[in-house]
Image (tube, helix red, strand yellow):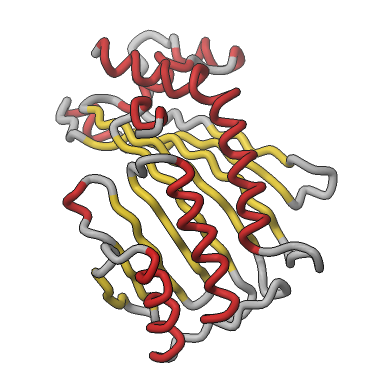
Amino acid sequence: MTRYASLSDDYYVNMHLHTEMDLPNNREAILHYFERIQKQYPSMRNFYSRERNEFVLEEDKERGDYRWASVEPRRICSGAVNAPSLKDAFDQHRLVLDVAPYALTLSPLDCDSLNVMVGFDYTYRGNHSALVAEALGMTPALERMADIPGATVLNHEPALQLALDEDCRTQCRLSIETRTNAYNVRTGEFPEDQLSVYLTVRRYGSLERDETFSGVMTRLAEICTELIDQHIIDQILRPLQKAIAIK
């Protein structure tokens, strides 16, 4: 089991490829695409369609760790929840990106954006925003407002977006999502809900002539892993984990 599993209650590694043009949605293309994925992962046997021509193939969710893949009109997605290792998750995404150009007639030109997202969920019954403020602090400019007598923090969702190259084609976004509202604070009734930390690394635009989808994804995965290891585990994930444990 990857060390990431010990940092939160659940973690997941997702890949999203957004296209400029609509993807094929005919029966032959969709079934061929998912059959190729299932050949590699036979336990992915739950296939169904949603509204708006969205198709999903996934493993049984009851296991706690599972894979899924989907095709939407302009998006190809792949996800692994509580994967045994990051390599397992990234290998799955590489397979999806290697199969898609042939099964779904996907061209390197037809890339609006490609991103890798790693998310961490913490189950917490209480004021999520107050917990985030306590565990991670606030910028000095806002600290005095939070100290106003009788004030209660209702929303505090820190987020930071950075460009990682000069032309801003490669970007990363760190965000924290809380799920506490004013009703919960007013009544003191807090459901057991998920507090989430998301790191997304995204590349915009068509691929270069010597690039492949899986190659670009591998580079994004490397950046994502490096950012988590160097800037997120000790600075965000462990402080949140410790604050929840104390509560």
The image quadrant of residue 152 is: top left
Asked if 17 appears above or below 107 in the picture, the reply is above
The residue nearer to you, when weighing 37 against 224, is 37
The residue nearer to you, when weighing 143 against 34, is 34
Would you say 85 lies left or right of 166 here? Answer: left
Would you say 17 lies left or right of 127 here? Answer: right
Dividing the image into 4 quarters, which one contains the C terminus? top left
Q: Is residue 4 visible?
A: yes
Q: Residue at x 70, y 72 (%)?
A: 108
Residue furthest right as drawn: 166
Asked if 41 appears above or below 5 in the picture, the reply is below
Instruction: Count all numbered tags in the image, as a single digit.
Output: 0
The residue nearer to you, when weighing 217 against 237, is 217
Q: How far from the left and from the top, in percent, is residue 157?
A: 46, 32
Dividing the image into 4 quarters, which one contains the N terminus? top left
The image quadrant of residue 166 is: top right
The residue nearer to you, when weighing 159 against 199, is 199
Q: How far from the left and from the top, in percent, is residue 61?
A: 22, 54
Q: How far from the left and from the top, in percent, is residue 174?
A: 55, 36
Q: How far from the left and from the top, in percent, is residue 143?
A: 52, 12
Q: Residue at x 50, y 63 (%)?
A: 95
Q: Is residue 178 visible?
A: no
Q: Residue at x 73, y 41 (%)?
A: 163
The image quadrant of residue 154 is: top left
Q: Residue at x 39, y 90 (%)?
A: 27
